[in-house]
Image (spheres, rainbow, N blue to C red):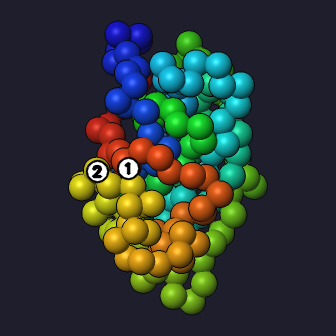
């Protein structure tokens, strides 16, 4: 174990990660992007985070913590993190571990992605992503099942097809410092 975090294995490698920060938490939240045995030489990860009606696109070097904040809203929207190439992602609250470099995502980095129907659409997309996670299925498998285009299926999921998904969606348990 590394600072209380399990060692990374090939089977923990994913492109899509889902997580819910505790509704009662207010303050710093973070994601640690760690390489896996099959991607130890990756120089940079491309990352998309969808959180309710907000989205951020960024890059990070392996072993970087993405830190941002959660307000005192009493809500727990599903965070969908897409990463390319596949990586292992740890989620946490409070101050991040000091062992890794931190990339702070400010409010200016986030883009509001809502429209008049945003709450309904966001809720539907979140529930559909949760169904995929609980079944261990990928967005690409949903493309096959629904017989829709990749673009249409990813739109239904609220994802961007530019971040490809090769592994099942993972739902991680809560990690703290």
What residue did someone put label 1 on? 169
Q: Position of residue 45 (x, y in %)?
A: 66, 36
Q: Residue at x 63, y 45 (%)?
A: 47
Q: Which residue is drawn at 41% across and 10% down?
A: 2
* Outermost residue, right side: 108
The answer to whether residue 48 is above or below residue 101 is below
Q: How crowded is mark 2: few (under 14 residues within 10 Å), some or many (20 or more)?
A: few
Counting from the top left corner in percent of width and height, residue 74 is at 37, 60
Quadrant where the N terminus is found in the figure: top left
Residue 97, percent from left and from top: 51, 20
Question: The residue tagged with tag 1: helix, strand or loop?
Answer: loop
Q: Which residue shows up at 37% across the image and 31% down it?
A: 12
Whether residue 174 appears in this view of the structure is yes
> As displayed, is residue 124 above or below residue 174?
below
For residue 95, side relative to residue 63 (left or right) = left
Residues at circles 2 and 1 in contact by the CB criterion of under 8 Å = yes
Q: Looking at the image, which is closer to me, 171 or 139? A: 139
Q: Is residue 25 visible?
A: no
* Residue, far bottom: 116
Is residue 81 placed above or below 28 in the rendered structure? below
How crowded pointer 1 is (Cα within 10 Å; few <14, some 14-19, many 20+) is rated as many
Q: Is mark 2 on a helix, strand or loop?
A: loop
For marks 2 and 1, give the CA distance.
6 Å
Of mark 2 and mark 1, the one earlier in the sequence is: 2
For the C terminus, the quadrant is top left
In the image, taking residue 112 as reference, residue 16 lies left or right, namely left
In the displayed structure, 159 sits above or below 24; it is: below
In the depicted view, which residue is nearer to us: 59 or 101? 59
Identify the residue position indicated by label 2 in the image: 136
């Amino acid at each position: 174990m590394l600072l209380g975090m399990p060692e990374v294995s090939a089977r923990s490698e994913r492109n899509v990660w889902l997580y819910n920060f505790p509704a009662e938490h207010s303050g710093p939240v973070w994601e640690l992007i760690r390489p896996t045995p099959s991607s130890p030489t990756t120089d940079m990860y491309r990352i998309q985070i969808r959180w309710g009606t907000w989205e951020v696109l960024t890059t990070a070097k392996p072993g970087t913590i993405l830190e941002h904040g959660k307000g005192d809203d009493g809500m727990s929207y599903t965070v969908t993190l897409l990463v390319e190439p596949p990586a292992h992602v740890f989620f946490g609250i409070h101050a991040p571990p000091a062992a890794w470099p931190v990339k702070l995502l400010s409010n200016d980095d986030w883009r509001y992605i809502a429209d008049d129907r945003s709450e309904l659409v966001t809720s539907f997309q979140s529930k559909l992503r949760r169904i995929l996670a609980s079944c261990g299925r990928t967005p690409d498998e949903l493309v096959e099942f629904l017989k829709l285009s990749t673009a249409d299926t990813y739109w239904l999921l609220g994802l961007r097809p530019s971040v490809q998904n090769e592994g099942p969606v993972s739902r991680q348990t809560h990690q703290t410092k």
